[in-house]
Image (cartoon, rainbow, N blue to C red):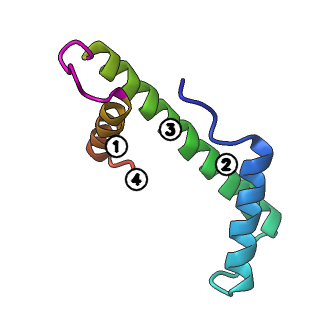
Amino acid sequence: MSGVRGTPQQVHRLANRIVEAILRQGYVKPKKDPAVLKDRVADLLQKNFEEEEALEDEAERIARSRVRQMVGVDQAKMVQLIKRKLAEERGFPL
């Protein structure tokens, strides 16, 4: 695995900042308690981070399986290229 994108507390802090900024600037007027919106945004962020981590893990597995074919290629760069290609194929925004 490539590493955690953030602790649950960090994800919630990020969600709080995003929602507070959106509300403060008047972009949306919540129909529910803002805490519900913050929790939903935190859930979406966490899901996105997990999906990206799974994508990176798959890219690393593919890179390791092809390492003999890619002599002289920086493995980190190869992982990023594979990850970008997988994301593009799956419609996943990076």
Q: Percent from the top left, x then y, of residue 68?
A: 22, 12
State the extent of the magenta-drawn residues as a range. 67-75
Q: Which residue bears the numbered disc 2?
A: 43
Upstream in the sequence, badge 2 or badge 4? 2
Q: Marks 3 and 1, how far apart in space?
A: 10 Å
Work out whether residue 38 or residue 4 is closer to the camera in this orientation and state it: 4
Q: Earlier in the sequence, mark 4 or mark 3?
A: 3
Q: Is residue 90 magenta?
A: no
Q: In screen coordinates, is 40 left or right of 91? A: right
Cα separation, mark 1 vs mark 4, equals 7 Å
The numbered mark, 3 or 1, whose residue comes first in the sequence reads 3
30 relative to 54 in the view: left or right = right
Residue at 42% in and 51% down: 94
* Secondary structure predominantly adopted by residues drawn in magenta: loop
Q: CA distance from mark 4 to mark 3?
A: 11 Å
Question: Hey, what amino acid is under mark 4?
Answer: Pro
Tell me if label 1 and label 4 are in contact, CB under 8 Å. Answer: yes
Residue marked by disc 1: 87
* Residue behind mark 4: 93
Q: Which residue is mark 3?
A: 51
Helix, strand or loop at label 2? It is helix
